[in-house]
Each structure stands twice: as structure tokens, then as C-alpha cells.
Amino acid sequence: MNIVVPTEEARMEEIKQKVIEGERLTKEDGLFLYQSDDLLTVGQLANLVNLRKNGKKVYFIQNMSLYFTNVCEAHCAFCHFRRDEGQEGAYTYTGEQMFEYIDKHYHPEMREFHITGGHNPHVPFEYYVDCLRALKQKYPSVTLKAHTAAEIEFFARISGLSYEEVLQTLMEAGLGTLTGGGAEILSERYRTKMGVGKATTDQWLEVQRVAHRLGLKTHATMLYGSIETLEERIQHMIYLRELQDETSGFLVFIPNAVQPASIKAGIKRRVSAFDDMRTIAVSRLMVDNIPHVKAYFINLGTQLTQMALTFGASDVHGTIIQEKISHAAGALSPEGLTKEELVWLIKGAGRIPVERDTFYNEVKVF
């Protein structure tokens, strides 16, 4: 009996036919796409899927990143943002203390505050609630995109409340959606090895499940480029795909490249451009039921972000103003971009810039 071993070209053709016919890709398909030398075909397939979903529109938002505290009980190996209580550079701001910073940059077209920070065990859960309430009272028209699923698990732990009770309390204070962080790589091997001292894979997914059940539309990230295997990256995507099948609650998937410890780090310490483009493309192909894949210019840099728009990405994030977490490490990108720069970036890739709100409602097409 002859056993036919498919060539790489034949295997790619099988996957191409699946994509053309709208058939879901398997874990094995995803691994093949990651390992194939034919990056351009992978990109073309992802571009096809994205054009089906979103046409040539690429989205951005006028937003501002806020960080209430960098004090954190976790010691994740990849994080250079966190501080211990009392350590030089540690801070914990109240909502009112944030007003001075916000008012320097706020304008009437600002639509979102993107709020993340440390898991600070030295303040009660009420502190986080009060911060959101203060912001919502002063800026009622701005959506509060606040806290990761890992932070929600932390709040539940320090308050004794359930995930649902934590989320409901924050929603009553003004929470509009969760940020996508804290997922890193949804693998317990990875989380143990990298010292991810926060929510487990199951806990992160369960918080998202509860949030979706309560009516929140949320975000999901993946932090790639350190010790994870390609199988773990693909499994991460499948976990999100399965939850999206169940809840339809995710708005966007954001694959983020890990940053080196220092801005002076050499190129061998950075994720390659090939890996960045391949990950954007494989994400679009594997996570077939989340509407958007984001090319986050903070992690990719502006030029690769532009390239990513033909590799399956349909979102470039937003103005940000001053990003701190990636820039506490070795990010080489700008800390923020203006609306005009984002429009230029998108048009330069032959796409149609669309200003959006947090929930992808269109504000203006350029």
C-alpha cells in the first residue's frame, strides 16, 4: 500500500480551499501556517478573510491611556511597568488626581479612556470603584474601557465578591467594557514559567464569560514572542474562538509582541517582522468569529502596523496620548499618534480610515 505524503504546496492548497469556502481551520492548519515559508500566501489568505468581513475599512479611536497605579502584587517576568509599594517610582493616584493630567489632553472628540494598571493590594476594591465613578461623573460622554479580566479576578479576591458582583459594581460606577490584557498566553505551562502571578487560563476565560453574560462587549489580547510554543499560540486562539462561539462577546483580538527589557536591546532580543506579520495573519485566519484583529502600533511600530493592514488587520487602536507599559520596557514606537497621523497611516496602505467609538460604531469615514 502506498502512503501519499502531501507536499507543502498541496497542504497550502488544501488550506486555501478551506478559507475560500469559509471552512474553519483546525489546530493543525494553524501550526502549518506558522511553519510555512510561504508568508505571502498566508498574508493573502488573511487579507481575503478580512476584506470579506470589513472591506477596506480600517478603524481607530480618539482615546487616552490612563494608569491609576503601578503598584502590583504580581511579578510577571515580562513586565517592566510594575513597582512594589514604597519603591522609587511607585504611585497610586485617585480619580481626582488624574483630572489634572486628563485636562491637559482632553478635547470634546475624546471617546474612550483606556485604563489599566497594577494589582495593588494596598488599597481596597472601593478605591478602584471610586476612581471610575469620579471619571464618569466628570467626563460622562467618555467610555470607560477599564481593567483586564485578570484585574477582575484580583478584585474578587481582595473583596470577597463574585466575578459577577465585581463587574456589576464597576458597571454601576461607569464601566463600559473590559480591556483585553492579562491573557498573555493562555497556557499554564507558560504562566508558571513566566511567573504570571495573576488569573489562571480558566479564570481569565470565566471572567470574560461572565462579562459577556452581563452584556459587556470586551477585548482579548495575546502576548507572543517569549517562551511560548507555536502550539500554545494556536491553542490560545482556539480558546478565544470557542468562547466567542458561546458568547459573541469579543469585539477584537489584539496580538501583542513582547518588548525587551531595554530600549537599547539589540535586534536579536526583539520579535522579528516576519513573526509579527505571520501572527497577525494567522490570528485573522484562526480567530474567524471575532470581527476585528488589531495591529497595535505601540508594539509593532508604525511601519509594520501599516503593512499589517494587508495581512488581516482592520484596526490600528487609537491616539493613546502617552502609553506607559510597553515604553517602560523597550518599545521603540511613538507613545501616541494624532488623528491626522492615523488617517495618513491607513490611507498610505490603500485603506479607508474610519474613526470609531469603543464598540465599532462609525463616527467618521475619511
Image (cartoon, grey):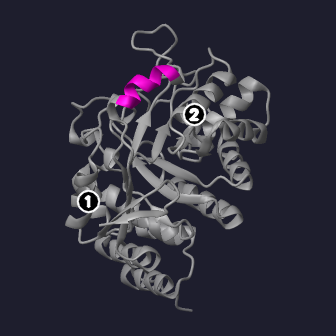
In terms of secondary structure, where does tag 1 sit?
A: helix
Horizontal arrangement in the rendering, residue 336 relative to residue 157 (left or right): left
Residue 252 on image: x %, y %: 51, 58
- Density class for disc 1 (Cα within 10 Å; few <14, some 14-19, many ≥20) is many
Boundaries of the magenta span = 96-103
Q: Earlier in the sequence, mark 1 or mark 2?
A: 2
Is residue 31 in sight in this rendering? Answer: no
Q: Quadrant of residue 293?
A: bottom left
Q: Main secondary structure of the magenta part?
A: helix
- Density class for disc 2 (Cα within 10 Å; few <14, some 14-19, many ≥20) is few
Whether the magenta-drawn stretch holds residue 143 is answered as: no
Camera-near label (1 vs 2) is: 2
* Residue matched to label 2: 137
> Could you say which disc has been placed on residue 127 in the image?
none
Which residue appears at 41% of the width and 85% of the height?
13
The front one of 303 and 186 is 303
Q: Quadrant of residue 78?
A: top left
